[in-house]
Image (tube, coloured by chain):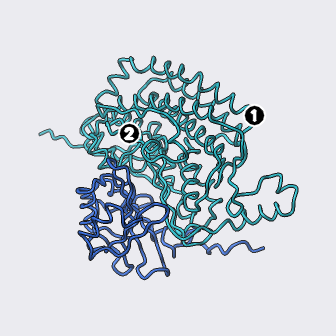
Amino acid sequence: MATTETMTLNMGPQHPSTHGVLRLVLELDGEVIVKVTPHIGYLHRGVEKLSEHRTYHQILPLTDRLDYLAPMSNNLGYILAVEKLMGVEVPDRAETIRIIMAELTRLESHLVWIACHALDIGAMTVFIYAFRERETVMEIYELISGARMTSNFFRVGGLSQDVPDEFVKKVSDFINVMPGYLDQYEGLLTTNPIWLKRTIGNGVISAEDAIDFGITGPALRGSGVDWDLRRDNPYSGYDKYQFKVPVGENCDTFDRYKVRLIEMREACKIVRQALDRLKPGPVLADCPQVCYPPKENVYNSIEGLIHHFKIASEGFPAPEGEVYQGVEAPKGELGFYIVSDGGNKPERMRIRPPSFVNLQAIEKMSVGTMIADLVAVIGTLDIVLGEIDR
Amino acid sequence: MAENNRAVQKLREKFAASIIDVVEFRGEVTVTVAKTAIIEILSFLKQSLQYNLLTDLTAVDYLGKKEERFMMVYLLYSIPNKDRLRIKTPVSEENCSIPTATQVWRTANWLEREVYDLFGVTFEGHPDLRRILMTDDWVGHPLRKDYPLQGPDREPYKGRLS
């Protein structure tokens, strides 16, 4: 007598649609998924352990490498946590530039998301277009920090340096053309019957389940929960900006796609408002115990050199206590929890990675669907393994 | 002040015997409670006080600094009220286990696996307690303070020689 049994299939860690080194062990009944077991940790670098052995300034470059598609958002989360611990006030200009960069980073991260998500589902043109626009953001990164990805541009108390003169024009040009490009993507996808068939009704997760699984960011808003940290627990001066928080209805991949597209348009608006607010002024707080001295002092005076040497080698002692700072990173709530024992290094630094928590729901969202739909679910969760494995 | 916090007042009313400490630092309220009541308190906060999102669950190793070595940290968030609350509970090295919070929030599943993996704290009643970031055959728990930074087989780093 013929019998049927389920098949176990190993997907990843080297697989183009797992966005890095994610390994999924699938149990299949034909092409239908019965069970998904994610295996992670292939990219574990021990960032939390390393942080316990570095001064607060030295940890900053490590945070670039968490979510490497949105380096400045990681920098911002960490910097804000340290500033909260130290009680440092940041000058207005530095805060505004931080917001410009955080929102450009959101655009950049979402551009990679739409590119890869569309490519996974089979729409290759969008991939080429979105990477073209991402290149402009990378150029802005390079212009201000010298690096395209590992920016390391923010500092505790402000920025490492002021932005060059052409920065405003470059950003302004980019956000003027960006909405037009978004129309292009929508033209390629929103009315595309194949795209609709692949995304509507795919990866459904109800609002209650999404909260229960701890999902945050656009993935949670796609399920109809109206919650955005930028608006509800404002940080870094976000309360001065006007923007809409898009919310989905049907809890599926298509709604999450729409939410992220609107978020990109809103990010352009926030950058526009920030450019209008940008006034000349200092970019580093007047707080010599914590901040590096300006470069001209370091090069031209012995006091400046000693000051720089002291901050670079010893760092600064932080008061005893513990703080948590969550920011609305492109992928969800990114949190930094720092426990200080009064020394110049954290006793413990915990990173709350949005991708790690969001990925946990993959089983809930994909059991009972086909393998091809699982690929769409990975795309819609928008995970980055650098952040999951830390 | 921390005492004016609504959640702290409710907890004081209901779980007076289990509360060890209440601290406010930089506007963040931290309540330290006894391990025996932790699940009861977490469920109460979720059901009665609308702390519906478990943002984070982690641990801190206070080797040689506190009587009880580990401190479990639960970071709760209330989406309706937009406020945070941190609940902590000490766990000793001799009795290195704590009841699981997976029945309260499904988020806790992977977060507890991570604490188990990196700190070696076990969770009673956890449905799938396996290592998550390190390989299955890994020996030791890397985030413990007595675990060397450069790995188990190397001389510990003693700072620059010059």
Question: Which residue does the image show at 60% across and 39% down from the upper left?
Answer: A101
Tell me if A182 is positioned left or right of B107 in this view.
Answer: right
Chain B: colour as depicted: blue
Residue A227 locus on image (x, y percent): 38, 42
Residue B139 locus on image (x, y percent): 45, 70
Query: How far is mark 2 from mark 1, CA to CA?
Result: 37 Å
Inspect the image, locate mark 2, and give the three-letter code of the amino acid beneath it. Answer: Ala
Tell me if A156 is positioned left or right of A107 in this view.
Answer: right
Residue B52 vertical placement versus B160 (above, below): above
**Which numbered marker is on residue A196?**
none
Q: The residue tagged with tag 1: helix, strand or loop? A: loop
Q: Look at mark 2 in the image and give the residue it sits on.
A: A219
The quarter of the rendered structure image containing the N terminus of chain B is: bottom left
Residue A344 locus on image (x, y percent): 63, 69
Badge count? 2
Q: The residue tagged with tag 2: helix, strand or loop? A: helix
Residue A313 locus on image (x, y percent): 72, 66
Q: Look at mark 1 in the image and give the residue it sits on.
A: A165
Q: Tell me the chain of label 2.
A: A
A25 and A55: which is toward the camera? A55
A362 and A164: which is toward the camera? A164
Chain ID for cyan: A
